[in-house]
Amino acid sequence: MVVTGTGTGVGKTTVTSAIAALAVAAGRRVAVLKPAQTGIDAAQLGDVDEVRRLAGPSVTCRELARFPAPLAPARAARLAGLIPVTTATTASVARELAVEHDLVLVEGTGGLLVPLDDSGGTLADVAAALSAPVLVVVGAGLGTLNHTALTVEALRTRRLGCAGIVIGAWPTQPDLAARCNLIDLPAVTGLPLLGVVPGGAGHLTPAEFLPVARRGLEPGLRALDWWSLETGATGQSR
């Protein structure tokens, strides 16, 4: 499964951690692949470290590259004088991980069409190469409907399967726009809203995090064949 978002700061890593934690609790072998993380130095803890902390040490976490500039991976790599990670390499590593794992989660950087490599390859190209369903993590509030609809339209144009939508970083006191998102997102996109993950969940202890993941995501995910990297009938975009 490929995890993307409508932008930065919408909670992709926390949602990825929640799915990984639920899969581990169900006895699955899980791997999380981060092709590139930007805006981070080598000595800092990154997204894969958050996943490992929240979902447990049994999760295989791979990060292919990190670049200090908080920009799209292709641009950040060039500024650092480094070679960008290609979509082909990302897909190849994901396939290798799939050999020994029941679930592989590929978490993107930024949104679906952010340039990953110098050829203009994006996370959408990775999903296409893997024939993997895409999970779209979105924010809550004004602008969410438009940003989500554009992402879903891009998936449909490329004939990529979409497993559904998750609202990440759900506010403690949601305003009217956020509350309306719960109804309007499925209506506008024609896709299931699989659940919500509260903001700040990434700062919980692992013992506290798993019940939050269960409440927020397990009911919505239960109906999906979401263990496999390959797209099943339930993962097809409508």
Image (cartoon, rainbow, N blue to C red):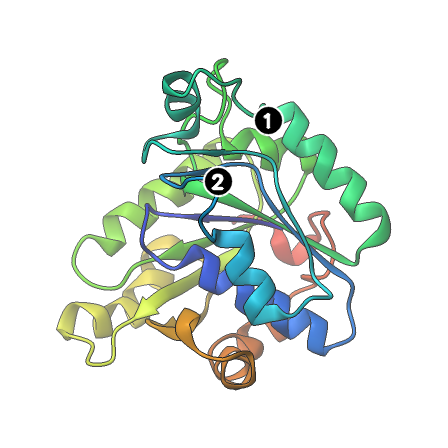
Q: Amino acid at mark 1?
A: Thr
What residue appears at the point 44 percent right and 56 percent down from the top-left corner? Answer: 12
In front here: 89 or 221?
89
Placement of 215 over or under 56, stated as above or below: below
Let me know if residue 190 appears in the view: no
In front here: 42 or 7?
42
Let me know if residue 105 appears in the view: yes
Residues packed near mark 1 inside 10 Å, few (<14), some (14 to 19) or many (20 plus): many
Marking on residue 87 = 1
Q: Residue 132: x and y, percent?
A: 65, 44
Q: Residue 101: x and y, percent?
A: 80, 55
From the image, tell me which residue sits under label 2: 42
Labels 2 & 1 near each other (Cβ < 8 A): no
Of callouts 2 and 1, the N-terminal one:
2
What residue appears at the point 50 percent right and 58 percent down from the top-left corner? Answer: 164
Q: Residue 125: x and y, percent?
A: 56, 29
Would residue 57 appear left or right of 15 to someone viewing this image? Answer: right
Instruction: Kindly state the secondary structure of the residue where label 2 is placed.
Output: loop
Q: Amino acid at mark 2?
A: Ala
